[in-house]
Image (cartoon, rainbow, N blue to C red):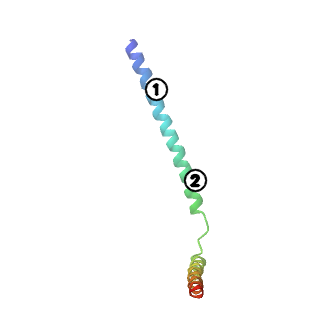
Amino acid sequence: MAVQVNEAKELAKNLEKQANKVQAEAGRRNKALKIFANLTSLPPFDTKLWRTSYKDQEGGVGLDKLIDKTEKEYND
């Protein structure tokens, strides 16, 4: 009888550990779903504005290279 009681206690401990793991995983998934819901409710991204910004950035890099080249030529 004592063996069965100990086995039942061990089984209960294992079930409790598994339940805690499941609860923690559910919490993480719930948080991920909330983040996903927030992301999907964002307004549409203005791709035209992004392309213009990216082109401006590329232009800035080109201008930096031109300045560096001109400065090098001047110094030589």
Circle 1: element type: helix
Circle 2: element type: helix
Q: Amino acid at mark 2?
A: Lys
Q: Quadrant of residue 27?
A: top right
Please state which of residues 57 and 74 is positioned toward the viewer in this rendering.
74
Q: Which residue is mark 1?
A: 13
Placement of the N terminus among the 4 image quadrants: top left
Q: Could you say which disc has been placed on residue 21 in the image? A: none
Q: Quadrant of residue 55?
A: bottom right
How crowded is the residue under tag 2: few (<14 C-alpha within 10 Å), some, or many (20+)? few
Q: Could you say which disc has been placed on residue 34 in the image? A: 2
50 lies above or below 7: below
Q: Amino acid at mark 1?
A: Lys
Please state which of residues 35 and 55 is positioned toward the viewer in this rendering.
55
Residue at point 56%, 82% (across, down): 65
29 lies above or below 22: below
Q: Position of residue 46 (x, y in %)?
A: 60, 75
Q: Position of residue 43 (x, y in %)?
A: 61, 68
Q: Residue furthest top?
A: 1
Please state which of residues 54 and 63 is positioned toward the viewer in this rendering.
63
Task: Confirm or deny contact between disc 2 and disc 1 (CB under 8 A).
Answer: no
